[in-house]
Image (cartoon, helix red, strand yellow):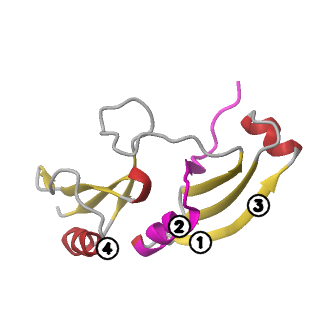
Amino acid sequence: MGAIKRFDHVGITVADLDTVTKFFLDLGLEKLGGPVQMEGEFLDTVCGIPEARTTIVMLQAPGGGTGVELSGFERPDPEPGQPSAMANELGLRSVAFEVDDLPALVERLDEDGYELIGGVGEYEHIWRMAYVRGPEGIIVALAERIG
């Protein structure tokens, strides 16, 4: 069995690709590529959906690392998820980023209409962390190293 070489990206399927892309760019991610429209045998084979068409935007934190792939399906119509899902529901629940100034970022996101799910917590005087609900219910974990 082959070994994993690296963690490449997390994929998030969204209904409004432009809004979600803007949200992540405003957080500080950078666009690696796209939007790129994909359809045809490759996509049909990989995702197992015949006649699929999607548009993809690839994002990454400054300096590299694991990417975020945003995908907006045009065919077939996207299926609604549960945008109010909480952290204890099964499945991928959040994407996490280390940030420089958590209080300032939380304040800015609140001004943009993205609220905290709970509050800002502190772990053993090492990390300050908060969950913010972004567009389409995406939970974004933001953590600042304080010690």
Q: Earlier in the sequence, mark 3 or mark 1?
A: 1
- Alpha carbons under labels 2 and 4: distance apart: 14 Å
Asked if the residue under mark 1 is in contact with the one under mark 2, i.e. CB atoms within 8 Å, the reply is yes
- Ranked by sequence position, the earlier of labels 3 and 4 is 3
> In the picture shown, does residue 56 fall above or below 33?
above
- Label 1: element kind: strand
Q: Which residue is mark 1?
A: 31
Rendered image: mark on residue 21: 2
Q: Does 11 appear above or below 62? A: above
Nearer-N-terminus badge (2/4):
2
Q: Which quadrant is home to the N terminus?
A: top right
Q: Which residue is mark 3?
A: 37
- Residue drawn at x 81%, y 39% is 44
The percent position of residue 26, horizontal first and vertical second, equals: 43, 75
CB under 8 Å between callouts 2 and 4?
no
* Neighbour tally class for label 4: few under 14, some 14-19, many 20 plus, Cα within 10 Å: few
Which residue is more in the foreground, 136 or 87? 136
The magenta stretch spans residue 17 = yes
Element assignment for label 3? strand
Mark 2 or mark 3: which comes first in sequence? 2
- Mark 1 and mark 4 lie on one chain; the one further toward the N terminus is 1
**Residue 110 magenta-highlighted:** no
Q: State which region is magenta.
A: 1-26
Compared to residue 50, the image places residue 1 above or below, namely above
Residue at screen point 23% across, 51% down: 117
